[in-house]
Image: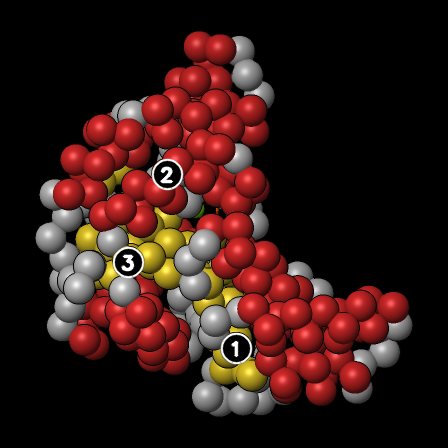
Amino acid sequence: MPRPSVVFIGPAGSGKTLLTWALGRWLEREMGLSVNYVNLDPSVEYLPYEPSFDCRTLVRAREVMEKEGLGPNAAIVKAVEILAEKVEELREAFAELRGDYVLVDTPGQMEIVLFRPSGVKLMRVVREASLPIGVFLLDSTLGRHEANAAISVLLATVAQLRLEVPVVPVLSKADAAGIRGGLVSHSMHLEVDEVVRSLSESDLGALSEMLSESMTLVKKYLKSGRLIAVSSVTGEGLEELYKVLHEVFCACGDLT
Ligand SMILES: Nc1nc2c(ncn2[C@@H]2O[C@H](COP(=O)(O)OP(=O)(O)OP(=O)(O)O)[C@@H](O)[C@H]2O)c(=O)[nH]1
Ligand SMILES: [Mg+2]
């Protein structure tokens, strides 16, 4: 069976890099697995994990910005385009990975991964070399919990259909959001039906109505109907995330 990989996707600052580190450390310590960390973000300045492959050896957004006179966002877009042209180098780097698990960190501009040809090319390399699952992160501190939960599963569904790999929705920063015991029980997960119920009890008006209706599509398309709340700081929810990833990997393995 191909080596499993987990690709972390999500809006800027949603916690992708810290979760890459936290889940990797959990897999190593609790499961005794060997983990390869891959950084595909050419703009990151500091990484909490030791990457087995770091795309900054091929291209750095800061250098692109200075050389081409671009702003920070355009420089990241350009840097990923340059990276995506280096398919052979990327293939070689992925072929050298030997761990049980590969964890892939991506740039904060999630639209690059989801909507640009360069992102599609990068995902193709990841898919050729491994059996990937996406983890879509949404920062749970951003607004009302029931809306966050629904938006999270909705965006994960879009990501799954764009990337053509299963995607697991995750609410990040659970330690800071106060969602435990409220929306999310101590088991740190929520079924889509529970999201629908919490929306029907909320007072969010048209937003709640639209999100409730969209949950029908989520239930139809999303491979994993479970939303996981995690904290990369306290480690809460990591075991639950691992269980869901494992279930999805096993299901995909059976299909291949
Ligand atoms: N309290 C808390 N803070 C977190 C958690 N995860 C990440 N953060 C903080 O959120 C900020 C962004 O975290 P990153 O992991 O860099 O997020 P990112 O999605 O990789 O960011 P970009 O790559 O720049 O888009 C940092 O200040 C982190 O310390 C968490 O579980 N709990
Ligand atoms: Mg990051």
Image quarter of the C terminus? bottom left
- Vertical side of 109 occupied by 254: above or below: below
Between 63 and 241, the residue placed more toward the observer is 241
Residue density around tag 1, few if under 14, some if 14–19, many if 20 or more, within 10 Å: many
| Amino acid type, callout 2 | Leu
| Amino acid type, callout 1 | Gly
Q: Which residue is mark 2?
A: 122
Task: State the separation of the CA atoms marked 2 and 1.
Answer: 26 Å
| Place of residue 74 in the rendered image (x, y in percent of width and height, measured from the top left) | 56, 24
Q: Which residue is mark 3?
A: 131
Q: Secondary structure at mark 3?
A: strand
Image quarter of the N terminus? bottom left
* Image-quadrant location for residue 253: bottom left
Residue occupying image coordinates x 25% and y 53%: 130
* Image-quadrant location for residue 91: top left
| Place of residue 238 in the rendered image (x, y in percent of width and height, measured from the top left) | 36, 74
Task: State the separation of the CA atoms marked 1 and 3.
Answer: 20 Å
Q: Earlier in the sequence, mark 2 or mark 3?
A: 2
| Amino acid type, callout 3 | Leu
Q: Secondary structure at mark 1?
A: loop
Residue 183 seen in this snapshot: no
- Vertical side of 93 occupied by 224: above or below: below
| Place of residue 158 in the rendered image (x, y in percent of width and height, measured from the top left) | 59, 57
Residue occupying image coordinates x 50% and y 82%: 189
| Place of residue 213 in the rendered image (x, y in percent of width and height, measured from the top left) | 76, 73
Residue density around tag 3, few if under 14, some if 14–19, many if 20 or more, within 10 Å: many
Q: Is mark 3 within 8 Å of ligand 2?
A: no
Task: State the separation of the CA atoms marked 2 and 3.
Answer: 14 Å
Q: Which residue is mark 1?
A: 225
Residue occupying image coordinates x 72% and y 69%: 214
